[in-house]
Image: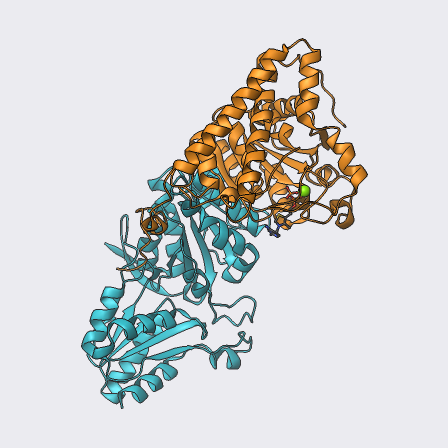
């Protein structure tokens, strides 16, 4: 890490919030996987099991009116902003109660009222869009910060570079967060990238500091997040953070992820944020009961969200013809 | 009161009108601020509105449209310039897959009120990569409104309607029209999208045109009247989406014949959609085949002699109509 700062200890409340978010996302996604295998979640679904600490660390550092832009791997980022779980589950199951009424699906979770400005499924596209939201905050004189999450593979597409440059030149209040899980879909990022650290080694091209953080350590993530978000809020311009992490499972759907060496998988499983953060909190004196209560509540939330989604009606076919235009309809002629 | 201004001057007047009207309107693009645009369409805007609202960008088409989209999603009404419409191909993801779909995918949570304005079409001998007429690319994407004015007056009014629309609008300025003059009344002008205009009334054939093809269709109508005794009605569609099918179908119902005049290359040009609508909904009125006059299905050449042989000309329009009415 090139930049080090000493920060005050993270308040207990924030630590518990992060643990709660990590556990909730984990349990939610384990259920989503099961529902996918059961044929209830259609199409595709990309899990961030193993990567939750990044969403939790940033989520806890964001203000309610800050904006999140994320990818198809966006369940975690959507949930940590406070989007109700039943509405996220409803969207995965294609129900009318879903956050997008079933029009979006797993890859397009959006909840504007919670600052989740969209989950985007075209690699790189949302980086310039996030820059635009940050430009808007700058123009409106608001001190909102935009945080944009994407993968390591995204650092090789043009939109990444266009967005970084524009954000730097216009000093936009945006934080770009590369979740480096070492793989794109099935190919290792190292096999197709000219530099070792896909995001951090590009930072200097845009006059930015190279920042690498342990993405499996929610506190390390939170510390960096708080710092770069404050910097953006204070008019200090954009940052690019590379968070090292690993997905426990495959890229999407039922991919078993067997293209990865077993030793590598084992090493990262040993660094699973759920048990490791739990141990740390226990070691710091948080009561076992308190953590168990968080876990039970997460389980209950997932059960309730699943049940609510299963019971919810499918959208009426007419809904397919709404929301194309501002008038609410889809008519292109008189 | 009215003044005679060029289509080029109408662009800056239109942008200025909307920036005065609404604080949330901002404008960005390559060379648009300090330099006043490569076509000098945006001169004076930086001076009047300042460098916060009128911004020069890097040569980053995806960043330009991404910035416009993100700003539009969060309370602004951006106008983005893509210098030549050919360059839309470099940022087509933003146009077709992001901007056009966001409202729908989010079930109306997000709106994207922005205008992408761009210099479209041939006639300036720029060759295959700076002369394409790509309004049909935009027309085939659900979620985009598509506008292409033919006169300075229409340009201002339709542009205002585009900026004030809560939907994304692709605004095609035909670059060969930039020097063309037209009467424009004083004061604010706000038109309505989805309204075609009957430029010249007629009884024998309906000639449907857009942008630079409108003056050619009108010139052809004069020749048809003077030399062939054929009365052609000329309709300027003005916007492809929304499409004013009512004006179109009423006209064809009277004339019984339709000829489209399109600058886009033939396959899947906008006229194909027009004749399909007429064929489905006005078939009984037809007195002959529906005819399309288009740029042939080739990349555009550069040399005058070659480019003139490809874009629909007055002669080709006359010939097609005479053959149809014979
Ligand atoms: C422009 C584009 N190209 C390819 C794809 C197909 N695709 C979907 S996810 C993905 C891998 C992305 O890798 P990374 O950025 O590392 O994100 P991760 O999935 O690892 O979170 C690819 C290639 C796409 N969605 N968009
Ligand atoms: Mg990856």
**Residue at x 31% of width, y 62% of height:** B243
Q: Position of residue B324 (x, y in %)?
A: 30, 86
In front here: A212 or A143?
A212
Which chain appears cyan?
B
Which chain appears orange?
A
In front here: A83 or A201?
A83
Any part of residue A70 in sight: no
Q: Position of residue A282 (x, y in %)?
A: 68, 13
Any part of residue B164 in sight: yes
Left-right relation of B154 to B64: left
Q: Position of residue A291 (x, y in %)?
A: 60, 16
Total marks in image: 0
Left-right relation of A95 to A38: left
In which quadrant of the rendered image does the C terminus of chain B lie? bottom left
Coloring scheme used: by chain
The outermost residue toward the front is: A38
In front here: A121 or B257?
A121
The outermost residue toward the bottom is: B326
In which quadrant of the rendered image does the N terminus of chain B lie? bottom left
In the image, residue A258 above or below residue B208: above
**Residue at x 56% of width, y 44% of height:** A37
- Quadrant holding ligand 2? top right
In front here: A166 or B257?
B257
**Residue at x 61% of width, y 17% of height:** A15
Q: Position of residue B69 (x, y in %)?
A: 47, 44
């Amino acid at each position: 890490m090139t930049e080090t700062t000493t920060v005050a200890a993270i308040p207990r409340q924030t630590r518990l919030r992060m643990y709660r978010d990590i556990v909730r996302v984990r349990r939610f996604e384990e259920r989503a996987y099961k529902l996918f295998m059961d044929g209830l979640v259609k199409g595709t679904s990309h899990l961030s099991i193993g990567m939750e600490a990044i969403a939790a660390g940033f989520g806890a550092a964001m203000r309610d009116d800050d904006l999140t832009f994320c990818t198809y791997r966006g369940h975690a980022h959507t949930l940590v902003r406070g989007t109700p779980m039943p509405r996220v589950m409803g969207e995965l199951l294609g129900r009318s109660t879903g956050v997008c009424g079933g029009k979006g699906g797993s890859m397009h979770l959006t909840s504007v009222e919670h600052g989740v400005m969209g989950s985007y499924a075209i690699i790189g596209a949302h980086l310039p869009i996030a820059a635009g939201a940050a430009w808007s905050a700058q123009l409106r004189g608001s001190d909102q910060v935009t945080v944009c999450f994407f993968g390591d593979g995204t650092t090789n597409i043009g939109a990444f570079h266009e967005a970084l440059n524009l954000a730097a030149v216009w000093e936009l209040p945006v934080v770009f967060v590369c979740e480096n899980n070492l793989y794109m879909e099935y190919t290792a990022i190292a096999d197709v990238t000219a530099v070792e650290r896909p995001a951090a080694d590009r930072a200097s091209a845009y006059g930015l500091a190279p920042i690498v953080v342990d993405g499996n350590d929610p506190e390390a993530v939170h510390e960096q997040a708080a710092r770069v978000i404050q910097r953006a809020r204070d008019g200090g311009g954009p940052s690019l953070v590379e968070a090292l992490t690993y997905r426990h499972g495959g890229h999407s759907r039922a991919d078993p992820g067997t293209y990865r060496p077993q030793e590598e998988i084992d090493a990262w499983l040993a660094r699973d944020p759920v048990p490791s953060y739990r141990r740390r909190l226990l070691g710091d004196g948080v009561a076992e009961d308190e953590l168990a209560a968080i876990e039970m509540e997460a389980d209950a939330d997932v059960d309730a969200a699943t049940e609510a989604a299963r019971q919810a009606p499918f959208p009426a076919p007419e809904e397919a013809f709404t929301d194309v235009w501002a008038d609410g309809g889809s008519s292109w002629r008189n | 009161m009215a003044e005679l201004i060029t289509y080029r001057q109408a662009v800056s007047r239109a942008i200025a009108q909307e920036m005065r009207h609404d604080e949330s309107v901002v404008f960005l693009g390559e060379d648009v601020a300090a330099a006043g645009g490569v076509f000098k369409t945006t001169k004076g805007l930086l001076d009047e509105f300042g460098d916060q609202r009128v911004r020069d960008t890097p040569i980053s088409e995806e960043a330009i449209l991404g910035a416009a989209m993100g700003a539009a999603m969060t309370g602004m009404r951006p106008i983005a310039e893509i210098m030549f419409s050919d360059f839309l191909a470099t940022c087509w993801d933003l146009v077709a897959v992001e901007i056009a779909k966001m409202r729908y995918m989010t079930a109306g949570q997000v709106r994207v009120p922005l205008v992408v304005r761009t210099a479209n079409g041939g006639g300036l001998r720029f060759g295959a990569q700076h002369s394409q007429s790509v309004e049909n690319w935009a027309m085939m994407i659900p979620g985009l409104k598509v506008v292409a004015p033919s006169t300075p007056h229409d340009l201002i009014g339709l542009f205002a309607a585009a900026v004030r629309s809560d939907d994304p609008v692709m605004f095609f300025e035909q670059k060969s029209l930039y020097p063309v003059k037209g009467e424009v009344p004083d004061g604010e002008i706000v038109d309505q999208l989805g309204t075609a205009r009957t430029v010249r009334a007629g009884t024998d054939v309906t000639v449907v045109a857009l942008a630079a093809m409108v003056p050619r269709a009108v010139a052809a109508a004069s020749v048809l009247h003077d030399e062939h005794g054929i009365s052609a009605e000329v309709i300027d569609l003005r916007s492809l989406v929304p499409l004013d099918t009512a004006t179109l179908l009423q006209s064809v119902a009277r004339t019984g014949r339709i000829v489209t005049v399109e600058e886009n290359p033939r396959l899947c040009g906008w006229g194909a959609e027009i004749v399909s609508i007429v064929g489905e909904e006005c078939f009984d009125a037809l007195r002959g085949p529906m005819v399309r006059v288009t740029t042939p299905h080739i990349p555009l050449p550069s040399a005058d002699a070659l480019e003139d042989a490809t874009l629909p000309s007055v002669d080709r329009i006359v010939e097609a109509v005479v053959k149809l009415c014979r």
